[in-house]
Image (cartoon, grey):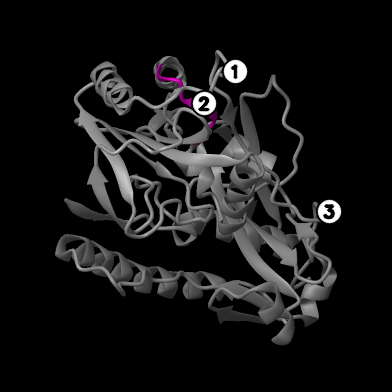
Amino acid sequence: MQRVFFFICYILVFNSWSQRPIYDYVSFNRTLKVPSELNSERSAVIFSVPNKVTDGIKAVGDYEKMLNQVHKGLRTMGVDAILYLNDIHLNASQSAKESYIELFNRRRVTNIIFITQLSDGYEYIMAPFSGTSRMIKDGSDAFYLKANDLYTLLLNVGKEVRRADQPINNFLIPEKPNYIEGLSIVEKTLLKNYPGILRRSELAVERFIPLDTVGIADQEVLNRIRAYNSSIERKNMELEQLMSGYPYKYVMIDPMTDDELKRNRYQFLLRSVCASAKTVKQMLDYEVLPSETAFVSIIPVMPDQTKVKTIPKDGLVCKFYVRQNISKNVHVGEWDADVTWQDALNNMIGNLIQEHNVGN
């Protein structure tokens, strides 16, 4: 049976932390076919667990127990799962996703495994890794199983792996799961300010991008995509409304490559990253101490005051920053991450106004 799965890529960076399975919108065959090199090559595991609430703030759900159980099961099957990555962090931003995919390729990952904790059980998908952000090649076969509990799921996966009777060449599998957190997305230097040249420069602001429906025949998926695209239109309207508070020139653009940005002479680009507060800090090259359990955001109170907001380290936040497209330096200003993209953007604009003494 062929089924189309879709995953909303970096355009969901500005999300409300709604959770869907992480699969790209790729058309593939749902089968019990075990990848041919599962027991001889490396695999990466992308997992998804329900969010939790910590101190009234939506946060990354507990996953340690699940990962330990999954890794023990995969190790017994002879599957060399060299790393585990939370889907929220994989999709923290387009830059983050590119960094993780580069890591997968550098570590010679051959197979990709998705494990998703659902409201009614667990879902398991594995297939050859495509080497790209789409994860699975269009039209390829993917192993698929679902069960009410994790023990049963792993038991059934193990049965199918043994039935495939592949030669086992993975002998140095680590005893514990290797959980990957935030990879740096800072290309050059992290600067905790906003450049004064923004006063006379045009800031490029990327729009939310709708999903493409080309080649998707599944009507249920098409309906979901169309509903999502309608929400994108509303978000873009809201984005433009919020940007009206930005004190200097800006222009709304569709995402561009570095070469396209240069050709259009866009020197500065507004970007964001959304994940757990700890992971966002790691991605932006902040120092994160093992003893830290929460971080304090500086919230502007206009015209010239601030207040603080404490957010747990596993709380889900967004943080806006300005990328200088020529030097590739990153300007972050104050640490003003917040629990919605709207609040995070307002914080960034307000702190920039105060830093530049706009209107004084």
Q: Is residue 254 left or right of residue 360?
A: left
Amino acid at circle 1: Leu
Query: Which SS class for mark 2?
Result: strand
Amino acid at circle 2: Asp
Task: Report if the CB atoms under discs 2 and 1 are less than 8 Å apart.
Answer: yes
Sequence-wise, which precedes: disc 2 or disc 1? 2
Range of magenta residues = 77-85
Q: Is residue 309 visible?
A: no
* The C terminus: image quadrant: bottom right
Q: Is 266 or 156 nearer to us in this picture? A: 156
Residue 78 covered by magenta stretch: yes
Which residue is at a point 67% across and 24% down the rendered structure image? 292
Q: Quadrant of residue 250 in the image?
A: bottom right
Q: Which mark is residue 80?
A: 2
Around disc 2, counting alpha carbons within 10 Å, would you say few (fewer than 14), some (14 to 19), or many (20 or more)? many
Measure the C-alpha gap from mark 2 to mark 1. Answer: 8 Å
Mark 3 or 2, closer to the camera: 2
